[in-house]
């Protein structure tokens, strides 16, 4: 190797290291490396072709000297052409004259008008002993450089590229982990600042919360499934608040509450004169939700005629107002909910199959209250505190009234519970709700039979429910007070000694320590 070529390659390696060190993403780093190979060393049409595990193919991820169309054509099977051979063998490959090499396919079509003979050199990009891609360059015949020297140099460059790809993947994984942790912390902050949050720690609701935190930072369409009143609207709101769209509009539309002949105009808007009474143009709810989130409740009630237009919005993020011909682009995340079986509607021809698949990207099922009875006392406690704040009145449930509500099936789910507690606060003249007073406010035929002398069935004895109720009261007071015992004691009207006794009695020491640690982490992230 001549001294001039040697110096050029050292300069190129230094420049490549600087590009990799300063690059902010994989694509810009690879483009910079290939530009250096081409401009400093006359290695033309340099490409980095990487294996895509989703497609099982090799495709050009970065190039220099290829047009966009030529680059798109650079897709290879693992057993196809020179690129496939280099990848499968993990060995360099040199083509002295591409016109005489049957394995050389020129799938990009970039060499059809090249004057003079072209040599081709490719080396594998190896990571942890396995090939992950291929680095290739062209050389002109008249270049007075031994191909062995080029191969040795390109192997060094390929090693640098492999290490940078590995580092980039680790950074992405770390960013994803930080995003998930940030979402979880945002949810804890929402709980502590009276923002929207889930009440209840049953295993099924913990799983719902885990799914929410996982999907919220993404752009994925979410389908919320569950009976009426389980809290689908609340969960949709939380997903929006935990996403990057939190500062943008959250638009809620109930597809069942708007007549079918008006729903198209409501969703997509209309132009002046589109129908009788359309005296002015008006944007629809999708346009109002631009850059934010639209929540379509009772999506199963969407008329079949509107489903094709809605599908276009889902697929292309485009719509046209009723009576208009102009196509409008929108950036909207779609959340949908239903209490109906969409699969059954598809089988009966009342819901489009392609729309069902588009909506069902990330389904979350919210269980009815009767399937998570361990959450009932926490929810009752939550609504009693809420009504105390709203109406300035504190009421309490007698033991038998509480037992009855635990055994009650709650056909209207959480919504029914909230409405019930509000009615009780309004109607009672006392601060204690007895079973006798409660009976008339429960759904007809649903009132459980509870005797003062009989324990609760299904492993929930009378004293256990009271103990659990008191424990939930103490936990809620601690959380509202930032896990400071004396503040919680003051809120409950207890002395510090009485509070300490209850903390020890219910084994809350670990929970207090964890709560304080969460608050410290939140403060650190906000600094």
Image (cartoon, rainbow, N blue to C red):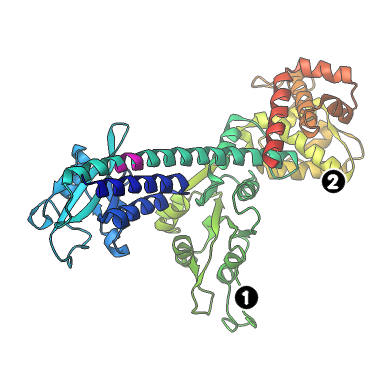
Q: Is residue 259 visible?
A: no
- Looking at the image, is mark 2 or mark 1 nearer the viewer? 1
Q: Position of residue 158 (x, y in %)?
A: 30, 42
Label 2 element class: helix
Residue drawn at x 60%, y 66% is 285
Element assignment for label 1? loop
Question: Which residue is at a point 86% across and 25% down the rendered structure image?
Answer: 486
Q: Which residue is at the far front?
A: 3
* Sequence-first disc among 2 and 1: 1
Q: Is residue 159 a member of the stretch shown in magenta?
A: yes
Tell me, yes or no, whether the highlighted magenta stretch contains residue 12: no
In the image, the segment drawn in magenta is 157-161
Side of 15 where 416 appears, left or right: right
| Residue 145: % across, % down | 18, 49
Q: Position of residue 1 (x, y in %)?
A: 20, 44
* Front residue (pair 370, 205): 205
Residue 282: mark: 1
Residue situated in front as seen by the camera: 49 or 376: 49
């Amino acid at each position: 190797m001549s001294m001039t070529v040697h110096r050029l390659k050292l300069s190129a390696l230094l420049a490549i290291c600087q590009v990799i060190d300063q690059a902010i993403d994989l694509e810009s780093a690879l483009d910079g490396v290939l530009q250096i190979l081409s401009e400093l060393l006359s290695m033309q049409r340099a490409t980095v072709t990487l294996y895509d595990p989703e497609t099982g193919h090799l495709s050009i991820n970065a190039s220099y000297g290829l047009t966009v169309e030529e680059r798109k054509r650079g897709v290879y099977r693992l057993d196809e052409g020179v690129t496939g051979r280099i990848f499968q063998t993990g060995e360099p490959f040199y083509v002295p004259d591409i016109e005489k090499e049957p394995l050389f396919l020129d799938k990009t079509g970039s060499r059809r008008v090249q004057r003079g003979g072209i040599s081709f050199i490719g080396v594998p990009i190896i990571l942890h002993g396995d090939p992950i891609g291929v680095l290739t360059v062209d050389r002109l015949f008249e270049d007075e450089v031994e191909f062995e020297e080029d191969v040795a140099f390109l192997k060094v460059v390929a090693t640098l590229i492999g290490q940078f790809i590995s580092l980039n993947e680790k950074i992405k994984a770390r960013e994803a982990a930080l995003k998930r942790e940030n979402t979880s912390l945002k949810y804890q902050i929402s709980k502590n600042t009276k923002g929207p949050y889930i009440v209840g720690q049953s295993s099924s609701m913990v799983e719902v919360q885990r799914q929410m935190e996982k999907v919220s930072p993404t752009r994925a369409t979410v389908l919320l499934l569950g009976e009426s009143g389980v809290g689908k609207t609340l969960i949709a709101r939380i997903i929006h608040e935990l996403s990057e769209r939190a500062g943008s509009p959250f638009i809620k539309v109930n597809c069942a509450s708007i007549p079918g002949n008006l729903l198209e105009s409501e969703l997509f808007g209309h132009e002046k004169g589109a129908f009788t009474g359309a005296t002015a143009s008006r944007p629809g709810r999708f346009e109002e939700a631009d850059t934010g989130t639209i929540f379509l409740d009772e999506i199963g009630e969407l008329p079949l005629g509107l489903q094709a237009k809605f599908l276009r919005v889902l697929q292309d993020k485009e719509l046209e107002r009723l009576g208009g011909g102009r196509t409008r682009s929108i950036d909207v995340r779609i959340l949908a909910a239903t209490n109906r079986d969409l699969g059954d509607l598809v089988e009966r021809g009342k819901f489009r199959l392609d729309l069902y698949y588009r909506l069902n990207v990330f389904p979350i099922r919210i269980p009815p209250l009767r399937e998570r009875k361990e959450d009932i006392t926490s929810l009752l406690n939550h609504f009693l505190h809420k009504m105390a704040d709203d109406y300035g009145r504190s009421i309490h449930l007698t033991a038998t009234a509480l037992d009855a509500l635990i055994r009650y099936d709650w056909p209207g789910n959480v919504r029914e519970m909230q409405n019930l507690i509000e009615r009780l606060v309004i109607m009672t003249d006392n601060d204690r709700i007895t079973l006798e007073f409660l009976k008339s406010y429960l759904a007809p035929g649903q009132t459980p039979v509870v005797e003062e002398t009989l324990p609760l069935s299904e492993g929930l004895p009378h004293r256990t429910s009271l103990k659990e109720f008191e424990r939930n009261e103490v936990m809620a007071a601690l959380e509202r007070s930032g896990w400071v015992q004396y503040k919680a004691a003051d809120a409950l009207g207890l002395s510090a000694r009485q509070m300490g006794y209850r903390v020890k009695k219910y084994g809350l020491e670990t929970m207090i320590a964890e709560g304080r640690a969460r608050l410290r982490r939140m403060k650190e992230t906000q600094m």
